[in-house]
Every structure is written in C-alpha cells, then in structure tokens.
Image (spheres, rainbow, N blue to C red):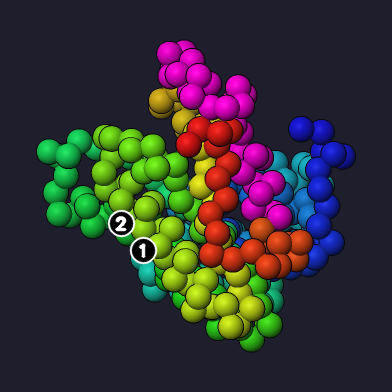
Amino acid sequence: MAEDMRAVYPSLKNRVVLITGGASGIGAAHVEGFCRQGSKVAFIDIEAAAAKALGEKLAGLGYPAPLFRRVDLVDIPALQGAVSEIAQALGPITVLVNNAANDQRHRVEDVTVEYWDERQRVNLRHQFFAAQAVWPIMRSAGGGSIINFGSVSWHRKTGGMPAYTTAKAGVEGLTRSLARDFGPDRIRVNCVIPGWIMTERQMRLWLTPEAEVDLLKEQCLKTKLVPDDVANVVLWLAADDSRMCSAQNFVIDGGLI
C-alpha cells in the first residue's frame, strides 16, 4: 500500500499509545502505524532483539524512537509497573492495544493443568490487567480507547489448540464486559479479530502451498492478509473518528468466517 494513500487521523497526533507485543509481526505494524500518525508510542515485549531491530527501522524512516520496555506479560506486577512508568514518561495513556498473544499448537491429550493455565496467562489474563492498569489513567484524561485482540480460530472451530481458542473466545467476553464498565468514563473497548495474517512467523511455521490454496478458496477476497491490514483498522479504532464504537468485534479476515 502506497504510504501517501493511507489515512491520516489528526486526533492521533501526540496521543500516548501503549501496544503489547509490539516488537514483531502485527504488533510491529501497530507501532509503525502510530509513529506515522505522530503519536507518542510505547510498546512492551519480551523480545529485546526484535524491539531493537524495529527501532532501527523506524529511525531509518525518520520517525521518533518509540519507548520500549522489556516485560514478560505473564508477570502482572511487571506489567503494572511498566504502565505506570510509561505514563510518567510520556503522559496519560489514552490508547491501549492489547495485541500480545502466542498461538502454540497442542493436542488435547497432551494438555496438563499447568500448560492450560500458562496459555490463559499468555493469551488472555494480561489483556484484563493491562486494561485495569490504564483505566484510572484514561478516566482522569477524559476517555480513551482500548483495543483487544481476539482470533477467528474459535469461530472457525479450529482444532489442535483448545487452550488458545478458549482464551481467544474469552477476549470477546472480556471486551463486552469492560465496554459496559468503562463506558461511563468515555472509554471505548472493542475487539479486533484477525484472520490468517501473513507475518514472518506464520509463513515460517505454517504456511505451505497447500494451506495457501485452501485459505484463498475459503476467503471471499482472494488476497493474503498482511499486518498493515490489521493495523489500519486499529488506527481508526484509536482515533476520534470511531468515537461511538464500543463493545464491538471488528473482523479483518478477507471474508473467511
């Protein structure tokens, strides 16, 4: 997509944005997109090397360096501390993108109690606690936008990863509950549901010629999705242009489900 054809949202300029899992994949597209809008961007990730590479790429594009904090999101006190630190450094956080997740495959017979709980910590629990941490900040600032990340996987009845699909189904319930609780404070809460997005990881681990043929057969739009397709919707949900959208699911899947 040509850069000069992308939408510009004046309301995002200087807005403080926090993105989880922002070092690579879809998360990196969010970071770059908000930097392009002139937002004050911070992101959290466990992968310091990928974060450094992203920072170098953004510097080469002429964007101010986003603020990076290395945090393992299963460590909730560390997450809460990072939110506080970022708000002190950049100002009130008024956009939260709960992007981080990990879609490990696993067989039903191999799942232990410990593995099940770990998958919920990685894919669901931190979304709640990040939202909880930014809530008073957004309330004091007069409002904000929280964008949670679900998945088409459970909508498609995808097998081979039941702990992941359960967590992602839970994200949609969490979104609707928080939208009700946070609405009086002018905080919008929505859920983005990506289809199969062609990140480097997805292509390396799971995209085969046969899988690509099957995917495009099922999609209404016969084009593979890329991270920017998701980031472009997230930018709109963060901007004032979507000011009356809350408790909604936004599916970006080329018509897959």
Residue under label 1, please give it.
125
State the predominant SS element of the stretch in magenta: helix
Q: What's under tag 1, amino acid-wise?
A: Arg
The answer to which of 84 and 144 lies nearer the viewer is 144
Residue 17 visible in the picture? no
Report the residue at 70% width, 41% height from top: 57
Farthest residue toward the right? Answer: 4
Residue 108 on image: x %, y %:
17, 39
Q: Which residues are magenta?
A: 208-236
Residue 120's mark?
Answer: 2
Which mark sits nearer the N-terminus, 2 or 1?
2
Q: Which image quarter: residue 245?
A: bottom right
Report the residue at 58% width, 33% height from top: 254
Q: In the figure, is residue 179 to the left or right of 103?
A: right
Residue 219 visible in the picture? yes
Farthest residue toward the bottom? Answer: 140
Report the residue at 61% width, 44% height from top: 230
- Vertically, is 67 above or below 55? below
The answer to which of 119 and 238 lies nearer the viewer is 238
